[in-house]
Structures are given as C-alpha cells and as structure tokens.
Amino acid sequence: MKRKIILFGIDGATWTLIDKYASDGYLPTFDHVMNNGARATLLSTIPAVTLPAWTSMFTGVNPAKHGLTDFILRTNGKFTLGTSNYRMVDTVWQIMSKKGLKSIVVNDPSTYPPYKINGIMTTGLMTPPGSNYVYPRELKNEIERVASGYWTDLPLDYYMTVNRNDTKAYSFIEEFANKTANVGLYLAENYEWDMLAVIFVSTDKIQHTLWHKQDYILKHYIQIDTILKRFLDVANKENANIFIASDHGFGSLRKTFYINTWLAHTGLQKRKSSMVGLLARAGLSPARIAVALKKLHLYEFVLRNLMHSDRIVDAAFQYDQPISMEDSEAFAKAEGIFINSNLAPYQYKKTRDLIRAKLQDLSDNGISVVSKVYTREEVMHGAYIDRAPDILFTLNDGYCPTYYSDGPDSQYIGDDKGGYKGGTANTGIHRPEGIFISYGSEIRKFDMRHQPRVWDLTPTILHMMGLPVPSYMDGIVLKDIFTSESQLATRTTIVETGSEKDKIKNRLHQLKSV
C-alpha cells in the first residue's frame, strides 16, 4: 500500500550547522528525525547551484538531460536566462499527475512559469515580480490571504537593508519562511494530496549574506526546526513518510574568484567600452539604479519586463567594461567557462587545455584556490550538454566563483562585491555537500555510508508511490533506507521503458499547449 510523502526542502542546509546546533540542544525536531530515521550527505550537481540542483532532484536526471545547467544557458549560440521553459523532462509531480496522483508544490525555486499538474503549484525565486505564480490561477487570492501576501523570493528591501540594519533584514527572513510554511500547511489541510513538497529558500538567502553573524543563522535554523515540527505533525496524522533535503550545502566565504577578470589577465578575453560601463565607473551602479527605481515605484515593472526578454543576460554583464564576445577565446556567463564556439577544433582543444592547466595552478598568495577542474563531459551527459560551460570547476573552502564582469585591470581574487559594486556582499557560499534525512513508519534508523546524489530522490519517491521509474533517469532507488519489514525494501523496482527522445517530444508538446 502506497503512503503519502512529504518533501521538506531546505535550500542550502548543511550538516556542519545542523549537527552542531542539534548536539547543543537547539534543534529538537532535527535531532529526533536524525536519530530515528536514515541520514546521509546528499551530493549536489556540478555546479552546486539552486537551479540545476533542485531540477535534478525533482526530475531524477543530471543537468545535461533536463537542460537547466545553470541560471544562464547557451542555446543556439546565444545566452538566455534558464527558466523552467527550458526544462526538457517531466518533474516527479508531472509523472504522478499522469498516474492520477495529486501533488501540492509550494515555492518551487526552479520553476517559472507555473504549469498544470494534478494538484496545486506555486513558483519561487525564478518568478518575475508581479507575475502569476500559482496553478490553478484561481487560487491566487486564497493563497495571498493565507500568506498575508505571498512571496516568491525576498523583496529588494532585504538587500537594501542587510548591510545597514541586520535586525530589520532578519525580520524579512523570518517572514519569508513563515509565509512559505503557512501556505504549505494550509493547502495540506484543505486540499487532497499524495505528495506535499514545500521548499524553504530563506536559509540560502541568510547564509549568503549573514554567515558572519552566526547568531542570526542559529536563530533561523531554530525557526526552521519549529516549522519542521508542524510538518512532522502532518506526516504523523496522515501516516506519511517525510524526506528532508537540501540542494547543496554551505560554508564561509573569504575571497571571491572573478572568472572573467582572470580570463582577461590571461589574455584570453578582450573588453570593449560602452555607455553602461562609463556610467558604472561614474558611480551609477546597478544597485543604485535599483534603489532609484524602487523609490519611483518602477522596480518591479522594469525587472519583470527585463526578465521576460532576452536582454536580462546582457544587462547582468554590462558592467565596467563589457566582454567583446567575438574577440574573446573564453568567457564566463555561468559558474564555469565557455569557449568561443567559433574557434576551430584544434584551437578549441588548445584553449580548453590551457585554461584547465592554468586553473589547476591558480593560487592566492601560495594557497591553492581550485579543488578540481572538469570538462563538462566528465560531470554530465545528455542531449543538452551544449547549454553548459565547456569547463567546470570546484573551489576550495572559503573561495567563491563569480561570473560578474569587472574591469580587466582589477584583482581577480579579492573581496566579494555581491556581484556588483554597491550591492550586497556575501559572506557565505555554496558547498556541494547537502543534507538528506528520511523518516517515517517504513524508514529504518540508518546512517548511510554512501553519498546519494540529488537525482536519486525522484526514483525513490516513485518507487514508494508504487509507480514505475522511467529508464532514462540517472538516479537509483535508495532501498537501503527502508525497514526490512517494509515491502519497499524487497519489492522489485518497476522500470518504465521508452526513449528519452519520446519524453522530450512530449515535453515540447506540453510547452506548445501552455
């Protein structure tokens, strides 16, 4: 007999904090589920970024198969913002919908626009301000009432406040988490569901900006622990199993690696002048423009229209001296390095090998900066691998990569500028090691020795719901989490055959019908 399942997502949650806070007695709910369920370190995607990681968790495939390789994608030689319109395989709730099962999905950070499922969906941080965020649309007023104004992301006021008034800034963090929780709990109580997925992004936001003030981080984890207790009560009432997972982990940020500035220093990248660059050097930074638009009540209008157009990517990189794309051999527009697609094959290989060697030798006053360097083929595979950077890498603890375009004469390893000068400086950064806890009547107490991948969760959920696992999925069913008495531990996994090409054709048909 299938049971209901709850997916409690905590963006950026990390064992380094949870274990410490729980052992100190601050997180009684986490302590309970950890000591009575299965736990593991959940490995993220490369790069360990929100959009590809959550999408892999919700689809069961690596980023080159689902197509969302980062927030910025290269498609047909152009760069575009990676919304879920570019996701090319079904999510777990789409698969469940086709089998007649109902899902409630709250604050999915990897989705915009909302799409039709057998159930209810609200989108998250990819949602342009003022846009519709809910399916079915007629529930919007109800959700707004329950949340006292639903937030798909933190308002601009948070970023305008956090460096000046951290107490006020923290109030936005608390409010964001409460809005997400209240909507999830309300919908779970008032509508039918087989799967309930609620994703909290407030943890990621506060860890980026206030990692250096651990009192606030602890306070927020205590809030999440209290919220988790409320969802655990729902799980107990509904006899549901619960998964608690993060898309990646977190750690401190000491210095930022400015990829494009470094490429300019190596001679592989050329710059050009622009009016935007002249204005930036005169002090009119994007952060200041945002503040001015906010005061004129035009910020949401401008951002919404910008995000709906291809100009959003150009706007994000028009800073100081923009990159001359046609004259450069390499450039970063995501957490990796793209090589100019117009290079001849021999020059492409030469450039890629040169960049790889130089990255491996990169140091900061004798300290190694880069942990590992990969070609994209070494860490992902699938029909949409060309959307990803040609070279990907992970950095050692304390270092953060950024693709924001600073002047070529600037330092390429230095203090974080929050993307733009005048913006919000980060003090915390993603790490690839996330968390996974499973708890319920069919879950055994178990400290998993191997490290599952984010794409293992969807096959495991489908197995638990008695549904077949599509053969194109990269993930595996985590059978070792189940008690020996549970049929889930011994039941043969049903594999649904069918080519990935057929799945993609179906997805394209769905997009055309929206």
Image (cartoon, rainbow, N blue to C red):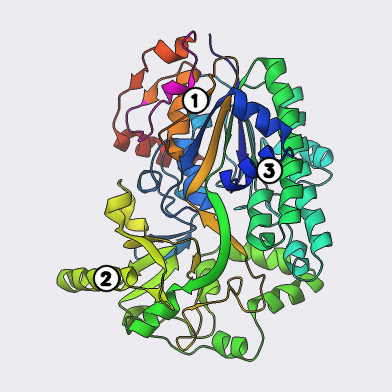
C-alpha span from label 1 to label 3: 29 Å
Residue 140 is a magenta residue? no
Residue 364 lies in quadrant: bottom left
Q: Residue 330 at x, y = what percent?
A: 33, 74
Residue 21, numbered label: 3
Q: Residues in magenta?
A: 470-485
Q: Earlier in the sequence, mark 2 or mark 3?
A: 3
Q: Residue 120 at x, y = what percent?
A: 65, 32
Most foreground residue, 260 or 284: 260
Q: Secondary structure under badge 1?
A: helix
Q: Earlier in the sequence, mark 1 or mark 3?
A: 3
Q: Secondary structure under badge 3?
A: helix
Q: Residue 514 at x, y = what percent?
A: 53, 41
- For marks 1 and 3, give the one nearer the viewer: 3
C-alpha span from label 1 to label 2: 41 Å
Q: Earlier in the sequence, mark 1 or mark 2?
A: 2
Q: Within 10 angstroms of label 1, few (less than 14), some, or many (20 or more) residues? A: many
Q: Within 10 angstroms of label 2, few (less than 14), some, or many (20 or more) residues? A: few
Residue 461, numbered label: 1
Residue 499 lies in quadrant: top left
Question: Does residue 446 sit above or below 245 in this rendering?
Answer: above
Q: Which residue is mark 2?
A: 357
- For marks 2 and 3, give the one nearer the viewer: 3
